[in-house]
């Protein structure tokens, strides 16, 4: 009996132990599957599903006559997805990545430039971004990469949309360039395992219309991102089944005011010169041509700048990356004389008054020569404009005073923004020096600004802008490049309108008299711009030659401003040629050729 009870007791103990073990196992299974189940499900999801952000395509850029200036094209990149290339330690992971990079470099005949330092930096700073090994693969490289990828988990091909410029260097400084956002900006995106960066405009139209400023309802060139959910296999191979996909949206298409024929012709005529040519619709302020010469070939900057080409541009003494048309600050010379004449007429100066020109003016002991060193004799205002007489305008300016000249120049937009969306210099209005406590204004300075020398600076765009105001009856218009905005399906989203910046207040007949002088500049036998005389167009103009001291000696920057009318449209033109002989010799014939060729085919 005792033995039986002892056996039963041992059996009970064993049963209880087994029951306890089973209970512990059941509790553990519940604890792991139910209590921590959600955590594990998220972990499994993170390991097997990759959410990839897809950047939206940028909109396209057209001229007003729909010549395509900027588009998108595919660029194929060889990338590493580092999360799928992990080993059981960081050291082994880096060794694995370097080994694969070496094999790919050998197979593709490319340099093996991936360093351990670069890999570590990428792991630390950009863990959610694929590591780009090679950009812009050729067709042969792409085919070979696809052959090798099944043997190399974590290696993939990504298609990156990059800017394509079918017209090469046409309007390159206007279009500008784009660049992908930085890694630090990409780290702010927490919702994606992998983040493909957006391209952002960095200069020119690309930057100005990335988003349409002041118009929240109208999207700009910048697209809207989409995403894809990708299932990876047990080896971590990235080109596996797609679970979900939201297509990115393309940005708006931008139509500029530029006329492709005017831009092409202007760039052709300015080739091998340093300077600028700007054509405006005088009534609206629309920019029809905006030429800066020389300029870069923007097609060579995508998908990225080559170091060699960038170094070549930086070392070029003629500054092809500098937009002279909008950012150049030049002394205008005699092209401001029509404005000085208007300032005088506003102040009551008689246009019939005669001034004796003997070829020179002596101001505070300094000599300022006239265009004719032997003198023009006695001239009234019309004759002084026609023959660009310095003596006349210096005497007139001394009597008028610097403040009244500066006020008229300000009314003409000198010293203020021209309103262009891609920017532009304010230039220099003499009032900034007249009112400065640091600068002691002299009579000599007043003499200089009377003839467009000294403390006055303008850009070619500003010169064309005030020429337009002369042409249209005294309306200073804001200049603009944006004509229309369309969505990717062709629906009109926005149409721009002209903006009046200032209406000149002038005495009756004052503007007509000055315009008569500008007509005689071109059409009189003694006019300083007679080389612009045309058999087919009535051209009103003004020459200018500004003497500039440089480290290599004194040079002449030469100007010609003019306007004409064709089929009820008035056109204002400014031409600048650096280091020329005179505005009449260098710029006036060029302006004539441009207007005759451009307007000959104008409908």
Image (cartoon, rainbow, N blue to C red):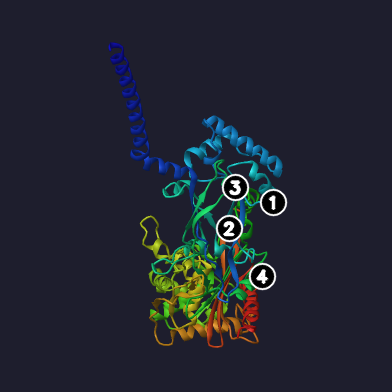
Crowding near the residue tagged with mark 2, few <14, some 14–19, many ≥20 C-alpha atoms within 10 Å: many
> Which of the two labelled residues, at mark 2 and mark 4, occupies the earlier sequence position?
2
Q: Quarter-wise, where is residue 269 in the image?
A: bottom right
Label 2 to label 4: alpha-carbon separation: 28 Å
User: At numbered mark 1, what does the secondary structure look like: helix, strand or loop?
Assistant: helix
x and y, in percent, of residue 89 in the image: 52, 30
> Which of the two labelled residues, at mark 3 and mark 1, occupies the earlier sequence position?
1
Label 3 to label 1: alpha-carbon separation: 12 Å
x and y, in percent, of residue 486 in the image: 49, 72
Would residue 401 appear left or right of 4 to someone viewing this image?
A: right
Q: Which residue is mark 3?
A: 156
Label 2 to label 3: alpha-carbon separation: 18 Å
Vertical placement of residue 447 versus 387, above or below: above
Q: Which residue is mark 1?
A: 143
User: At numbered mark 4, what does the secondary structure look like: helix, strand or loop?
Assistant: helix
Question: Who is closer to the viewer here, 418 or 553?
Answer: 418
x and y, in percent, of residue 81 in the image: 55, 43
The answer to whether the residue labelled 2 contacts the one labelled 4, judged by CB atoms less than 8 Å apart, is no
Q: Quadrant of the C terminus?
A: bottom right
Label 2 to label 1: alpha-carbon separation: 20 Å
> Which of the two labelled residues, at mark 4 and mark 3, occupies the earlier sequence position?
3
Q: Which residue is mark 4?
A: 268
Q: Which residue is mark 2?
A: 162
């Amino acid at each position: 009996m005792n033995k039986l009870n002892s056996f039963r007791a041992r059996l009970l103990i064993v049963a209880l132990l087994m029951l306890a073990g089973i209970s512990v196992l059941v509790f553990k299974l519940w604890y792991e599957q139910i209590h921590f189940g959600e955590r594990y499900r998220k972990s499994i999801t993170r390991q097997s599903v990759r959410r990839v952000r897809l950047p939206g395509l940028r909109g396209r850029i057209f001229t007003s006559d729909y010549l395509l200036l900027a588009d998108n094209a595919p660029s194929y990149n060889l990338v590493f997805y580092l999360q799928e290339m992990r080993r059981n330690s960081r050291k082994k992971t880096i060794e694995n990545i370097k080994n694969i990079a070496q094999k790919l470099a050998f197979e593709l005949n490319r340099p093996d430039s991936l360093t351990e330092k670069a890999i570590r930096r990428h792991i630390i700073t950009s863990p959610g971004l694929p590591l780009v090994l090679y950009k812009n693969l050729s067709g042969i490289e792409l085919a070979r990469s696809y052959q090798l990828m099944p043997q190399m988990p974590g290696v993939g091909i990504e298609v990156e949309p990059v800017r394509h410029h079918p017209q090469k260097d046409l309007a390159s400084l206007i279009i500008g360039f784009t660049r992908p956002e930085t890694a630090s900006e990409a780290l702010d995106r927490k919702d994606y395992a992998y983040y493909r960066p957006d391209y952002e405009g960095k200069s020119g139209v690309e930057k100005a219309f990335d988003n349409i400023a002041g118009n929240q309802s109208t999207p700009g060139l910048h697209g809207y991102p989409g995403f894809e959910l990708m299932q990876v296999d047990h080896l971590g191979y990235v080109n596996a089944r797609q679970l979900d996909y939201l297509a990115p949206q393309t940005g708006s298409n931008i139509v500029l005011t530029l006329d492709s024929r005017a831009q092409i012709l202007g760039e052709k005529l300015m080739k091998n010169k340093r300077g600028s040519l700007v054509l405006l619709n005088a009534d609206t302020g629309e920019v029809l041509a905006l030429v800066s010469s020389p300029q870069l070939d923007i097609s060579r900057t995508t998908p990225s700048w080559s170091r060699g080409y960038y170094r070549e541009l930086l070392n070029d003494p003629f500054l092809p990356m500098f937009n002279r048309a909008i950012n150049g600050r030049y002394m205008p010379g005699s092209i401001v004389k029509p404005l000085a004449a208007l300032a005088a007429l506003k102040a009551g100066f008689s246009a019939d008054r005669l001034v004796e020109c003997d070829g020179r003016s002596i101001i505070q002991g300094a000599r300022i020569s006239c265009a004719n060193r032997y003198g023009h004799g006695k001239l009234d205002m019309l004759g002084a404009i026609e023959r660009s007489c310095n003596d006349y305008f210096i005497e007139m300016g001394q009597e008028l005073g610097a403040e009244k000249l500066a006020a008229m120049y300000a009314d003409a937009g000198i010293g203020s923004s021209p309103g262009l969306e891609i920017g532009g210099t304010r230039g220099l209005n003499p009032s900034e020096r007249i009112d400065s406590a640091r600068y002691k204004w002299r009579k000599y300075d007043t003499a200089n600004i009377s003839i467009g020398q000294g403390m006055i600076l303008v850009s070619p765009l500003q010169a064309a802008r005030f020429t337009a105001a002369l042409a249209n009856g005294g309306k200073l218009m804001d200049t603009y490049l944006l004509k229309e905005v369309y969505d990717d399906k062709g629906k009109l989203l926005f149409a721009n309108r002209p903006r009046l910046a200032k209406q000149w207040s002038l005495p009756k007949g004052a503007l007509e008299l000055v315009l008569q002088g500008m007509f005689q500049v071109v059409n009189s036998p003694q006019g300083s711009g007679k080389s612009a005389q045309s058999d087919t167009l009535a051209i009103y103009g003004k020459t200018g030659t500004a003497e500039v001291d440089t480290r290599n000696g004194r040079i002449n920057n030469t100007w010609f401003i003019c306007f004409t009318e064709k089929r009820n449209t008035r056109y204002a033109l400014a031409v600048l040629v650096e280091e020329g002989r005179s505005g009449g010799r260098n710029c006036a014939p060029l302006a004539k050729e441009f207007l005759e060729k451009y307007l000959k085919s104008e409908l």
